[in-house]
Amino acid sequence: MELSTQLIWLFTLSLPIACVAWTVTHEEVFREPREYCVRCSKSSQTLIRRKFFYLFTCEYCFSHYVTVVFLLITNFQLLLEGWKGYLIAGFALVFVANFYMSLFALLRQAIKKEKTEIEVLQQEVPKYKQ
């Protein structure tokens, strides 16, 4: 596969990885299982059990596992063929996916800040009209 095609695959395949990782670790649809995982990651008696449940609460950690699933599905390799290509692709996909999630988090934060500022302004406007 040509390098340009590999790069397109890298930046495109990172999108669904970021989407799945973000949805599971942040969105309301998975709130109850995530809260259970948070409790178990803090209160389980064994280290292995705590770390296992922590994986479902951290988007960075979880994105590694989502990446492995996507690599198995797509057989995507980057730069080299064989296990080395899978290894490079895996870490590159995780990096790009986490970059996407960081941008998304910043965007959501900016939108939330804007909404809050608008609400404050809307509450202040009636005061000035009187």
Image (spheres, rainbow, N blue to C red):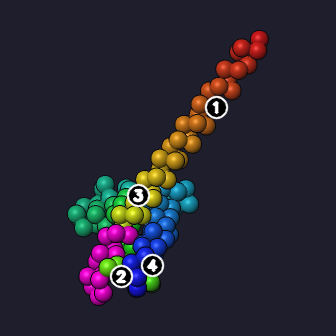
Q: Nearer the viewer, residue 106 or 9?
A: 9
| Mark pair 4, 3: CA separation | 20 Å
| Mark pair 1, 3: CA separation | 29 Å
Give the residue at mark 4. Answer: 5
Seen at 64% across and 31% down, the residue is 119
In the rendered image, which quarter contains the N terminus?
bottom left
Q: Nearer the viewer, residue 66 or 114?
A: 114
Residues marked 4 and 2 touching at CB (< 8 Å): no
Q: Earlier in the sequence, mark 1 or mark 3?
A: 3
**Residue at the farthest right position:** 130
Q: Which tag is nearer the camera, tag 2 or tag 1?
A: 2
Query: Is residue 23 in the magenta section?
Result: no
Seen at 55% across and 56% down, the residue is 28
- Relative vertical location of residue 117 with respect to residue 80 in this rendering, above or below: above
Q: Which mark is residue 99?
A: 3
Amino acid under label 1? Ile
Measured as percent of width and height from the top left, residue 126 is found at: 73, 19
Give the residue at mark 1. Answer: 118
Give the class, few, some or many, for how many residues have Cα within 10 Å of label 4's Cα (few <14, many ≥20): few
Q: Secondary structure at mark 1?
A: helix
Q: Which tag is nearer the camera, tag 4 or tag 1?
A: 4
Measured as percent of width and height from the top left, residue 81 is found at: 30, 87
Q: Is residue 101 visible?
A: yes
Amino acid under label 2? Gln
Q: Which mark is residue 77?
A: 2
The range drawn in magenta is 80-93
Q: Earlier in the sequence, mark 4 or mark 2?
A: 4
Seen at 49% across and 67% down, the residue is 15
| Mark pair 4, 2: CA separation | 11 Å
Q: Earlier in the sequence, mark 4 or mark 1?
A: 4
